[in-house]
Amino acid sequence: MFAVISLDFLSTEVDGFEVYFTKSFLITNELKVFCVVTKGGLGDCLSMGRQLKCGKYLRKSMAKTVFIDRDGVINRRLIDDWVKVWDEFELLDGVPEALKSLKDAGFRLVLITNQRGIAVGKFTRETLDDTHAKMNDLISSKGGAAFDAIYVCPHDRHENCGCRKPQPGMILQAAQDYPDIVLADCVMFGDSESDRGAAENAGCKGFYKIDEKHSLLDQVKSYLL
Ligand SMILES: [Mg+2]
Ligand SMILES: [Zn+2]
């Protein structure tokens, strides 16, 4: 069986399908023909109509990834305080729609958040996990898409860990956990310079700044344009 696959797909594994590239022929700079063996059978995709169908099929199975900060992006940032319990978590306008747009466009949603409130004893990891479960439920209940993965740095500044943004540790960990992630293709959405720094230090290709004038939804729209 055969599939015609654009070069976009070359560097990435195809999740969820038993696909083995056994032979390839360059047709144009954009297109290669692969001999593809699949478990379920994609069928003979060599005819023009089926090329497109097959491309779509494969594209859908391969999540691209975006990294998103939490405080000030997903929920209202508290002045000189942490969101310690769920009652203090205020979802910002447009967030469910923004996450749904990204999900519909094929992106894996990865939350990357510094929470040194844990290190200073303001809340526990268990409370935080509970808050994140409720956050995902709330986003889903408002028609949004929940986060696929959540990475937390629980350390304090002086601990010099590799994960507290602007260090890239959480992003690099995600790239290890999801081998299809190509960091050079990824962007980050965040409200602080440490988010920008983490994205840069991890080798991401871009950063979208969230502020009073630019919500997550605004920035997602401009990213997806
Ligand atoms: Mg923030
Ligand atoms: Zn850390």
Image (cartoon, grey):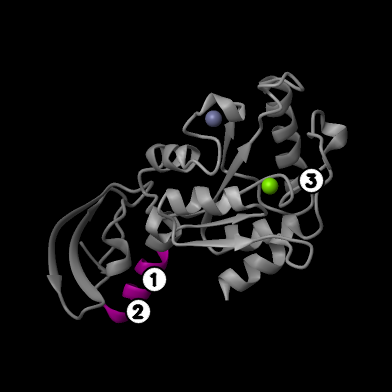
Which tag is nearer the camera, tag 1 or tag 3?
A: 3
Image position, residue 170 (x, y; %): 49, 38
Mark 3 lies on residue: 77
Q: Check whether the beta carbons of the residues at disc 2 and disc 1 lie within 8 A of each other.
A: yes
Which quadrant of the view contains residue 185?
bottom left
Image position, residue 103 (x, y; %): 58, 57
Dot 2, how many residues are within 10 Å of its Cα: few (below 14), some (14-19), or many (20+)? few
Disc 2 residue: CB within 8 Å of ligand 1: no
Mark 2 lies on residue: 49
Which mark sits nearer the N-terminus, 1 or 3? 1
- In this view, the residue farthest toward the right is 87
Which tag is nearer the camera, tag 3 or tag 2?
A: 3
Q: Secondary structure at mark 2?
A: helix
Mark 1 lies on residue: 53
User: Which stretch is magenta?
Assistant: 47-57
Mark 2–mark 1 distance (CA, rounded to whole Å): 7 Å
Mark 1–mark 3 distance (CA, rounded to whole Å): 44 Å
Residue at 75% across / 22% down in the picture? 123
